């Protein structure tokens, strides 16, 4: 992108254009698009991967939570990874998959929503935001086919419906809205989802919903070595975010720590977790 003489901005930055930042980037600097990446030619190269994330609706909205571990093969690459982010005021996104690409996708998604609102003067609907994320996940398909997938979970508070909603994606960008009220993705998702199937109740209180997702992440960590459970000795606990009619809120670390300690203490007497009734 060439600069004009005298320090003036190029016309691309001053002319009225598309409400999509990705379209703008594709037209002005396509080499910066994630889909234009090339893999490093390093024998045995392994990228850090984020692991398990969960989501659940509850009485006041929806929450997203993630463990903190990233792995490279059988090695723990990082124990303090943030996998849950605000997308905008009324939505959040959590990531599993190739960590660097996933964080880049989140930043582009945040910018895409902000750019749309500045150009159009209004925010996208929740379905519109979910559709924009579909396009971005599909743009990473080339990397996904080479083993570097990004699989997000998107959740938000629908101000028109007055309820929380959850959207999941596959590596091709296929989007599904979760009617069950909960979702999980990542390496430990099968265990987390199984846990939530027994613990989740529609219309749960915030406290019960937070406890349920921490229990689910504990169950995932119990059976999946790539998922990190609550680590009391290092004071590392899941990251939990809430989206309600009041907007996005990250649950205070002290609150998550208290719930995590209660869950860990309960597992001393019941290692497999709380029992659901047969009928």
Image (cartoon, rainbow, N blue to C red):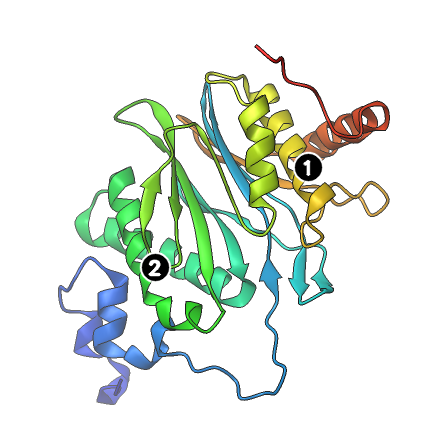
- Image height of 170 relative to 46, above or below: above
Residue lying farthest left?
Answer: 16
Determine if residue 112 is in view: yes
Question: Is residue 75 toward the left or the right of residue 177 in the image?
Answer: right
Q: Earlier in the sequence, mark 2 or mark 1?
A: 2
SS for dot 2: loop
**Residue 95, placed above or below residue 231:** below
Q: Is residue 250 visible?
A: no
Q: Which residue is mark 1?
A: 219
x and y percentages locating residue 256 in the rendered image: 68, 33
What residue would you read off at disc 2?
172
If the image is split into quadrants, where does the C terminus sit? top right
Pinpoint residue 73: horizontal percent, then vertical percent. Answer: 67, 67
* Picture residue at 85% right of the left edge, 28% below the top: 268
273 on left or right of 31: right
Q: How far across and down, in percent of the image, does residue 2 sit?
A: 25, 88
Alpha carbon distance from label 2 to label 1? 28 Å
- Residue that protrudes farthest toward the top in the picture: 279
Instruction: Report the quarter where the N terminus lies.
Output: bottom left
């Amino acid at each position: 992108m060439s600069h004009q003489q005298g320090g003036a901005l190029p016309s691309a930055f001053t002319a009225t254009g598309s409400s999509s930042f990705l379209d703008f980037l594709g037209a002005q600097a396509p080499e910066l698009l994630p889909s234009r990446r090339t893999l490093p030619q390093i024998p045995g190269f392994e990228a850090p991967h984020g692991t398990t994330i969960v989501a659940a609706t509850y009485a006041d909205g929806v929450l997203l939570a993630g463990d903190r571990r990233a792995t490279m093969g059988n090695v723990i690459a990082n124990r303090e990874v943030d996998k849950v982010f605000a997308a905008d005021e009324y939505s959040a996104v959590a990531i599993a998959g190739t960590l660097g690409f996933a964080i880049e996708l989140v930043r582009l998604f945040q910018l895409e929503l902000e750019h749309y609102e500045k150009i159009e003067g209004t925010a996208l609907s929740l379905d519109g935001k979910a559709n924009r994320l579909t396009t971005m996940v599909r743009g990473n398909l080339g990397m996904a086919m080479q083993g570097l997938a990004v699989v997000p979970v998107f959740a938000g508070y629908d101000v028109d419906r007055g309820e929380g909603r959850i959207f999941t994606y596959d590596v091709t960008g296929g989007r599904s809205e979760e009617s069950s009220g909960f979702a999980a993705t990542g390496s430990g998702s099968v265990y987390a989802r199984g846990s939530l199937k027994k613990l989740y109740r529609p219309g749960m209180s915030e406290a019960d919903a937070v406890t349920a997702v921490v229990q689910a992440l504990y169950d995932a960590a119990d059976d999946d070595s790539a998922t990190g459970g609550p680590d009391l000795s290092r004071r590392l606990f899941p990251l939990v975010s809430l989206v309600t009619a009041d907007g996005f809120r990250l649950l205070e670390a002290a609150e998550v720590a208290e719930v995590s300690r209660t869950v860990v203490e309960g597992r001393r007497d019941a290692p497999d977790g709380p029992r659901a009734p047969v009928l």
